[in-house]
Image (spheres, rainbow, N blue to C red):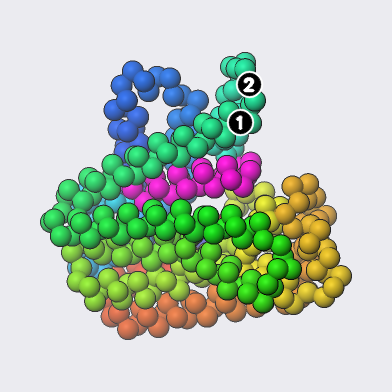
Amino acid sequence: MAESPLSAPLAAVRDAVGTETTGAFDRTVDALGALASHLGDMVTPARALLDGGKRARALLAFAGYVASGHSPDRPGEEILAAGAALELFQLAALVHDDVMDGADSRRGLPAAHVAVESAHRARGLAGNTEAFGRAGAILLGDLLLASSSAAMDIARASVATHAGLAARGIYDFLCAEVAAGQYLDVVAAATPLDQDAEGALDRALMVLRHKSARYSVEHPLALGAALGGADARTIEGLRAVGAPLGEAFQLRDDELGVFGDPDVTGKPAGDDLREGKRTALLALTWRAADATERADLARLVGSPDLTPDGVARLREIITDTGARSAHEDLIASREKDASIALAALSPSDEARELLVELSDRLVNRSR
């Protein structure tokens, strides 16, 4: 399904944040002086990847900023810098995630570690090519995090002290929580499918919440509102919208990781199955599967040699057990909770329009 164009205010902010994000990364690299000339193999993949992405987190921060009382037609330097900080953090997380998962592509391009591997081969360097690629990508992720933090400092310095400190506190917690959630994901992937199957769904939702859902939606909304000087009631109201909406967003992402079109998502078909991701969708499938289906799940999920036929078999099991339908019910329930919370928040008409538009794009999407 083709996505409808963004509304004018969101499209303008998306483009402005894209420019600010590139500029922030350039400033970080340029500050290294002559040293920067030695970093081409590591930095080039980041520049390519920065051109992609939906800018969803930056747009959510902007919606929170408007909900704090600012005009959608006049975004200040602070919210553009904060949007850049979120985008740079997002790419850092993706670069590191791809290393951990051994993913080959991102946003329709070679993953950062794959691109650095290619540079190793092209230059005829000695040593293990894969290890060189992983090391380069890990360090690139660190460089992106440094650039993200610098952009957030610009945002903080552009507003009153109390608003800047509040926003920076949200940002700092976001960074720490994602690291913790990522570790939970690593532990989950190492847990056998048949170990505490009844608790698997709760574990999957905990990982989803702390690794992705909150930093993707809830925290950006709160950060934008705090930066705009919103009161505690408004920030908590936005969190009440963002918490279930973030879960719906990530649940949709997990569904696309199995059933999405690679030409649209930019990732190979069935990558999450190949990587053995312990998602809510997989937990629902295991719970409903019979002995034969469980044997196939145990054999195929997490196999690095998973073939297209294997992916097709897993999709068949997920569908036939009713897990895909149950997963859609989870998404719908969280989308409903977010809608109820938005009604209770009673934001301005301008803020409501932005939040409704973004909610729909986050959940009802094909990439």
Q: Where is mark 2, residue-wise?
A: 127
> Is the residue marked by circle 1 packed among few (<14), some (14-19), or many (20+) residues within 10 Å?
few
Image x and y of residue 358, in percent: 41, 66
Q: How many marks?
A: 2
Q: Position of residue 354 (x, y in %)?
A: 34, 67
Disc marking residue 131: 1
**Location of residue 236 in the rendering, given as x and y in whole percent from the top left corner:** 30, 74
Question: Residue at left 64%, top 26%?
Answer: 129
Q: Are marks 2 and 1 in contact (CB under 8 Å)?
A: yes
Q: Amino acid at mark 2?
A: Gly
Left or right of 316? Residue 76 is left
Q: Residue at x 63, y 74 (%)?
A: 199
Secondary-structure class at tag 2: loop
Q: Where is residue 27, by image quadrant?
A: top left
Give the residues in magenta. Answer: 84-106
Main SS of residues in magenta:
helix
Quadrant of the rendered image containing residue 2: bottom right
Work out whether 257 lies above or below 40. below
Category of crowding for the residue at label 2, using alpha-carbon neighbours closer than 10 angstroms: few (below 14), some (14–19), many (at least 20): few
Q: Nearer the viewer, residue 153 or 319?
A: 153
- The residue lying furthest to the right in this view is 292
Q: Is residue 242 left or right of residue 286?
A: left
Q: Which amino acid lies under the numbered mark 1 shown in the image of this protein?
A: Ala
Quadrant containing the N terminus in the rendered view? bottom right
**How far apart, in angstroms, are the residues tagged by discs 2 and 1?**
8 Å
Whether the magenta-drawn stretch holds residue 96 is answered as: yes
- Position of 159 relative to 315 (above/below): above
Residue 92 rendering spot, x and y as whole percentages: 45, 44
* Residue 2, visible in the rendered structure: no
Q: State which quadrant residue 9 falls in.
A: bottom left
Q: Based on the picture, tell me whether residue 92 belongs to the magenta stretch.
A: yes
User: Measuring 59% from the left and 67% from the top, which residue is drawn there?
Assistant: 204
